[in-house]
Amino acid sequence: MRKYLIIWFGEVVSTVGSALTSFALGVWIYERTGSVSLFSLNLLVYAVLGLAMMPLAGVAADRWNRKWVMLVADAGLGVVTLVVFLLAASDQLQIWHVYCLTGVSAALGTFQWPAYKALIPQIVPKAQLGRASGLSQVGDALAELFGPTVAGSLYVLSGVGLNGILLIDFVTFLFATAILLLVSIPRQTITLPAGQKRASVFQDFHQGWLYITERPGLVGLLVYFLIFNFFLELIYPLALPLLYQVGMPDAAGQAMSIMAVGMLVGIAGMGVWGGPRRRIHGILIPGILSGLAIAVAGLQPSLVLITLGGFGYYALLPISQGSDQALWQTKVAPEVQGRVFAIRSAITYSVRPLALLLAGPLADNLFEPLMSAGGGLAGTFGPIFGVGPGRGLGLLITLLGLLSAAAALSAYFFPRIRRVEADLPDVV
């Protein structure tokens, strides 16, 4: 685990730095526009560019040295952050600049992800994959824990603001790049039968697709996550505006950081426990409970209630994601993991653009007016959720949480999903 832990530490630092910038730019956009739709558009740009680059990123992770794929991606992300800093420092940063640079960041980050995930079973023993998969989420947990609080505080602090946050992010990318340069990792071995030529990029990608479709249990998992993630992707762009309706940016950042403590609790549990013996239980049961936790968060315009619901969701997330990642790392042959993981991610998150397109209009043009004073749903749901600004967001988030819980519960009724571990042999 030593080499993995060194690389992991560098990526954790980089992820936390990126979270500072992400939060600050989100506040910057929302302060200038007051629009959930324009706030969501930045997330949409990130999603579309990431999905577009995913097939090539998966092939790159299997063809090239995975360490160097990560290194180039980290270095490129650092350059993008520096460009945003220079524009902001010269008072020339525009919203369309943020959208463009977000797209470039998405493309680079997409190359990094499958290379990092496929690198884990290359250097980590099979018995430690559950723990390693849990640890791989620490960066996200710390980003959620410290990112909003630190970014919110720095953003309103005189002399720091957006410029200082961008500079901190740039330094973290330099650190992650230096860490990768110092660690020696052998390139994955790729053997071809005698006389066989190297397949094209399209053929490589097609082989990864066939690997999944020939295994119905993996297909079933993809369909489940496609539905489950659609509801979650609708929720993500609504969460920050919901918090803004209750508190100022620094209070919202503190609430998000408290929620992220739940993720650290879940990761600590996975690190010690490694997840249930049957990974499918570790995937679906937390899925049900996390949906219910989200539903609680939307019930009242209370920072405490929102924080408790978010805490429960984040505590369950590492168990579900860690169990799912360990299952795929155990059942998918190492030589195709980059492509398979990229395809898996592209399919399950293909709903992100649609969700981001729908989230803003649903909130701004439908649910918020319906839950305003005298609105069409105010008389029905007002006694539960309250009436006024932010209550349409709360109702929508509760509804989506219940739908995601129902999706996880329904997956248990499909034998291909429930028996995926018994039907597929281990390959690692």
Image (cartoon, rainbow, N blue to C red):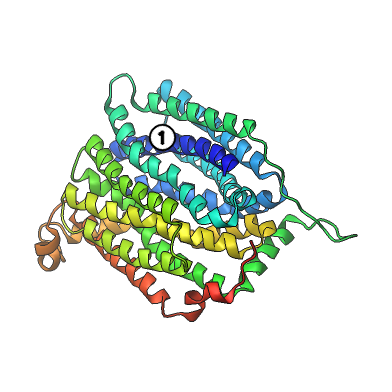
For disc 1, the marked residue is: 21
The local secondary structure at tag 1 comes to helix
Residue 244 lies left or right of residue 384; in this view the side is right
* Corner quadrant of residue 143: top left
Residue closer to the observer: 208 or 98 = 208
Residue closer to the observer: 317 or 198 = 317
Residue 34 lies left or right of residue 19; in this view the side is left
Q: Residue drawn 71% across and 46% down? A: 64
Q: Residue furthest right?
A: 195
Q: Residue drawn 54% across and 58% down? A: 346
Q: Looking at the image, is 261 positioned above or below residue 320?
A: above
Image location of residue 381, percent across then percent down: 14, 65
Quadrant (top left, top right, bottom left, bottom right) of the C terminus: bottom right
Residue closer to the observer: 153 or 327 = 327
Q: Looking at the image, is 141 positioned above or below residue 249?
A: below
Residue 15 lies left or right of residue 307; in this view the side is right
* Corner quadrant of residue 392: bottom left
* Corner quadrant of residue 205: bottom right
Q: Residue drawn 41% across and 58% down? A: 319
Residues packed near mark 1 inside 10 Å, few (<14), some (14 to 19) or many (20 plus) = many
Q: Judge whether residue 42 can be spotted in this image.
A: no
Image location of residue 227, percent across then percent down: 43, 68
Q: Looking at the image, is 195 positioned above or below residue 113?
A: below
Residue closer to the observer: 97 or 103 = 103
Image location of residue 7, percent across then percent down: 56, 39
Image location of residue 299, percent across then percent down: 18, 59
